[in-house]
Structures are given as C-alpha cells and as structure tokens.
Amino acid sequence: MSGPLVLMVLGGTGDARALAKRLAGDLRFQASVSLAGAVERPDTYALPVRTGGFGGAQGMARFLEEARIGALVDATHPFAARISANAVAAAEAACVPLLRLERPPWCPSSGDDWREVDDLDAAAAALPQGARPFLAVGRKEIFRFAGRGDLHCLMRMIDPPGEGVPLPRGRLVLARPSDDADTEAELLQSHGATHVVAKNSGGRWGAAKLVAARRLGLPVIMVRRPETGLAGERAEDVDAAMEWLERLAGGAVSG
Ligand code: NAP
C-alpha cells in the first residue's frame, strides 16, 4: 500500500486556512502550505508552512519535483493572478494534478448600490469629487488613490505601507477585516464614509463591509476579478476540494 498523498496548498486566503485545518491530522495526507510572505504577521496555519516565491513557474516546477509533491491546490486569492498562472504551468511541467480552489464572486443583492469597475485605477476615477471613501485596499495598491487630493479616505490594511509609499489624504487603520457587520458599520460611520471601495474577493471573509454598506445605503465601487482564462479543475469551497483530494488519495492507495 502506498503512503499518504503528499500535497501542497498555495495559500494566503481564508479558504487555504480552512483547508489546512481539515487536512491537519488526517493520516491520508501529508500536506504543507506555501505563502508568498506578503504580510509581516501571517495568519497561523494548522500545517507546516514554507514562505517566499519559487522564482516563477520553472522554480515552482522544480520545487514540486524535489519535494515529491503528488497534488497541488491553488487556494490563492482571486486577484493573485500571477501565482495562479505559474501554478498551471508548473503543475503541467511536473505532471502534478492541480486543483484551483476559488470561491464564487459576490453578487449585488436587493438594496445594494454597486458600480463595477475593472481595476483600482478605474475605482479611483469613479469616486466623485470630495468623497469620503472607505478603501478596503492593501498596502501595495493604496498608492493608486494618492493622486486624488480631493478625497478624504479611511484606509484599512493589515501591515503599514512601506516608507515613502504615497498615501491618499485621510485616516489609516491597521487591522484585519472584521466579520461582524455592526463593527464594520461603526467604522464606516465614525469616518462619515460616503462610499466603499472593494475588490470582488467573494467568500465570507470581507463580506461584512458590504452588509454594512447596504445597511447605511452607501454606494460600493466594486473591482471585478481579473479574467485569467486559466484551464483546469476547480472547486468552489473546501468541501469540494476535500472530495477531489480524497479521490486522489483513494486512487493512490488502491492504484
Ligand atoms: P501574485 O501577484 O499572483 O504573485 C506574485 C508573486 O508572489 C508570484 O509570482 C510568486 O513569486 C509569489 N507568490 C504569490 N503567492 C504565493 C504563494 N502562496 N506561495 C509562494 N509564492 C507566492 O500575488 P499577490 O497578488 O502579490 O498575492 C500574494 C499573496 O497574497 C498570495 O498568496 C495571495 O493569496 C495573497 N493575497 C492576495 C490578495 C490580492 O488582492 N492580490 C489579497 C489577499 C491575499 P514567484 O514567481 O517567485 O514564485
């Protein structure tokens, strides 16, 4: 009988954390997580973690071969397009089965006032003169709003922006998103927010700000997901990802 299925989860999302929790302690799997190292204090994972880029698709393919990875789950963020493209190329080169775990995007519901745009530059341009937006935008991308000197922004990010990063005028809050709509509504009200700017990440993480915007009647400038056009097997949630892995592990044992 063959041993456990050796697999790696490309992480950096709540889904990756939830999947790691399900895999930890399951003897059918020997799993680890890969993180980019994008945040200074990453969330904890229930599995061993490696950190840092692989050096492109070729580097990842080499890593997959050397670590004898038998399955790869790309559970990175829907807006992290480069790593997902690398995962497709690397998995193909190393002949490793790949699953893309990607939650469905959010859709506006009754009472929502959304304006959808293609990117953050378009989001910055869509804000009216003198707006007081809540920018749910990370430290690497916040500079895109810096050119709008008329705005008064509420910015929330996990780590402080690097020195010299141009910031828009306003208030900076260093925190993770809350999953409580009341807390998000209080934050929006404390700023006198007129708009919410968000990327369409989907999932329950980060959805509370949209519920808060709906309650307060605030328009949302929503950035659409990038069209990656990547082929391959997909799962929309952790249960479906586990089923895919169980099938693979079952095949490995009986095969
Ligand atoms: P990206 O533009 O797609 O990737 C840039 C480079 O970072 C990749 O080419 C790769 O470097 C490295 N990388 C990214 N994710 C990695 C991982 N899980 N393990 C090892 N290396 C990784 O990604 P990004 O938008 O900067 O996002 C970076 C991380 O933050 C991702 O893990 C993502 O899940 C998470 N995240 C992103 C967003 C967002 O809005 N983009 C939001 C929340 C969380 P090499 O080419 O050297 O391998």
Image (cartoon, rainbow, N blue to C red):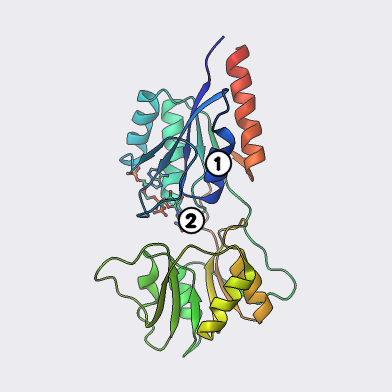
The residue depicted at 61 percent of the width and 50 percent of the height is 103
In the rendered image, residue 46, in percent from the top left (x then y), is placed at 50, 39
Q: Secondary structure at mark 1?
A: strand
How much space separates mark 2 and mark 1, taking CA atoms?
13 Å
In the rendered image, residue 50, in percent from the top left (x then y), is placed at 37, 38
Of the pair 53 and 30, the residue shown nearer to us: 30
User: Callout 1 environment at 10 Å: few (<14), some (14 to 19), or many (20+)?
Assistant: many
- Three-letter amino acid code at the position of disc 2: Phe
The residue depicted at 53 percent of the width and 45 percent of the height is 17
Where, by quadrant of the figure, is residue 139 drawn? bottom left
The residue identified by callout 2 is 79
Mark 2 Cβ and ligand 1 under 8 Å apart: yes
Res. 132 visible in picture: yes
In the rendered image, residue 170, in percent from the top left (x then y), is placed at 40, 82
Q: Residue furthest right?
A: 110
The disc, 2 or 1, on the residue closer to the chain's N-terminal end is 2
In the rendered image, residue 224, in percent from the top left (x then y), is placed at 55, 63
The residue depicted at 57 percent of the width and 17 percent of the height is 252
Q: Check if mark 2's residue and mark 1's residue have beta carbons within 8 Å.
A: no
- Three-letter amino acid code at the position of disc 1: Arg
Res. 193 visible in picture: no
The residue identified by callout 1 is 100
